[in-house]
Image (cartoon, grey):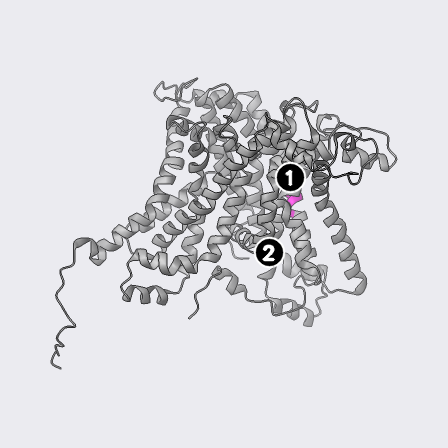
Amino acid sequence: MSAPTRPVADDRWGPLQHPKPNTGFSAGPILVVLRYVVLLMLAAVFILPFYIMIRNALATQPEITSFEWVWWPKEMQWQNFTNLFKTKEVNMGLGLRNSTLLAGCNLIFQTLFASMAGYALARIPFKGSGVVFSIILLTLMVPGAVTFVPSYVVISELGGVNTLWGVIVPGLFSAFSTFLFRQFYLDFPRDLEEAGRLDGLSYYGVYFRLLLPNSMGIMAALGVLSFINSWNAFLWPSIIGQSAETRTVQVVLSMFLTAQTINLPALFMGAVVAAAPLVIVFIFMQRFIVQGVRMSGIKG
Amino acid sequence: MAAVEIPGTIREVSVPWWKQTRWEATIAFCVFVAPMVIGLGVFTFLPIVWGLLISFSEARNTISIGNWVGLQNYRDVLSDPQFIRSLRTILIFAVFIVPLTFFFSLFLALLVNSVGFGKAFFRSVFFIPTAISYVVASVIWKMGIFSGVPSGFANMVLYWMGSNNVIAWIGETNPPYYWLVLVSVRLWLQVGFYMIIFIAGLQEIDQSLYEAAYVDGGKPGWTTFWTITFPLLRNTSIAVLLLNFIAAFQAYDEFVNILSGAGTSANLSLARPPLVYLRQVALDQQDYGRGSAGAFILTAIIIVITLVQGRIFGFGRKA
């Protein structure tokens, strides 16, 4: 017996059986060439911002502000990197630490809490289960960012302004992920679970020893999405974590961007430093990210 | 048949109450659901209830409830020309960004899906901006591409094309080029996300439909696109439109980072979206009552428009 390690929806689509593209367009040779030309042009446009960011991060200020476009810095200015971390007003190191903490907590706890709740709602017999599920779904009605004013009020009453827990904890509870995990566990083969129960496992044992190890695919998909989203979050960290010790890397970079004097190479190096961890995560985890995005398509 | 008693297999064991099946299930349910329910309770329901109460209170420089003023805060917000202006701003923004994202991401999905060699590469290239934050993108857009100096990339392109104009872009109000900056940055960041959703939708379409159409003389191309592909993408299209619209209405990051601060002649008053208005009322002016009232008005607007859109496009109907 093999338990699904991927969301079941994927298995339903099955492998593509037809080598033909499925848009229904036939492809004459001219059309194929044309498609590649358009694709390459669009790809160039999409890569352009990355190019400009990296060029500026490794150039000197005169090269950036030159009236003639400098395609690539004459000598790559690696010291821009060390200069960035030496700039006192811009505490990039602390920002990176805070963002790592924020995104790490989201990666682990947001998925864990959602999967625990999803498992209970899907599998543990309890009379009030439907009511609990409806209450959780109700929170999906309210657009998250809009309620930041009431949330700010509650967090400040709880003493969370300018603390790291105030930045991190309120974002760890995702009703939508709970919904997705419930769907996933509903489709999970019952036999495996029942075999475990018969062998004397408690509900905790079934979850931690059977279901959790077998749901690593969906855990990775939703976990990496919450990692990316929390690393890139700006609104909440910028209002709740304004003090020097609690700024995330996005808040630090934003303050650098809107500061009075601008050191362009350091600013762009800051952008590279803020973006690089995610680009690396993205390249290695793309399969899971694609899966996660497909699942969020259900939301509409 | 007589019951056969096999010694040693069936024993009377006194099971403690927490291990009896019914109780065991109840306790386990509560334990598993507890973090989520408590978390949502404290960080979602409590703010909503507290915010609702504070929106009926006079709460300047205080976050306590009780100084009831009825609907005064709601009247104040709705009669504030700044708030009305912020709604107009975000509507203009949505009118540009939603259709542009829709068509562009559908176009990319079809294009990427129609080629064999290099498919994964192109998909990654269009998708990877999803990993970039609005703050990072704002740095590139504001100081790299659309900086209003001759060395900015956009002005450089104009120069290569033979124009000696130096356009301020972000500071330019006539024509309002700052919209080009704001719309293009969001387009770059989100179009790959919706492209992936469209590709998933395309892969769900049954291949045999195209074969059947072919046998019946339906020429592959525009005909099959309009008669098969597009109608079968209906649910995906609705999902893309609604997600995109809700996200656009909550735009904040790029407006704040591109339009405010030094380095440009522009400022936030050019285009102030509702969330910036709320932050200024609630956090800068410390009027939590009015800020909460505004938050609920905005929530109501988003829910109503979402439901109306859903109605128009027939949400939930089978494709």
| Callout 2: SS | loop
In the picture of the structure, the residue carrying the numbered disc 2 is: B233
- Residue located at (29% from left, 48% from top): B30
Q: Position of residue A197 (x, y in %)?
A: 29, 63
- Residue located at (36% from left, 48% from top): A133
Question: Which amino acid is tagged 1?
Answer: Val
In the picture of the structure, the residue carrying the numbered disc 1 is: A272
> Is B231 above or below relative to A264?
below
**Residue B216 as seen in the image, left or right of residue A181:** right
Disc 2 crowd, CA 10 A, few/some/many (<14, 14-19, 20+): many
> Is A37 above or below relative to B263?
below
Q: Quadrant of the C terminus of chain B?
A: bottom right
Q: Which of A92/A200 is in front?
A: A92
Q: Quadrant of the N terminus of chain B?
A: bottom left
The residue positioned farthest toward the right in the image shown: B162
Q: Which of A150/A158 is in front?
A: A158
Chain for disc number 1? A
Check contact, mark 2 vs mark 1: CB within 8 A. no
Chain for disc number 2? B
Please check the rendered image and state whether residue B99 is part of the magenta-colored stretch, yes or no: yes
Residues drawn in magenta: B95-102
- The Cα–Cα distance between marks 2 and 1, rounded to whole angstroms, is 37 Å
Q: Is residue B100 visible?
A: yes
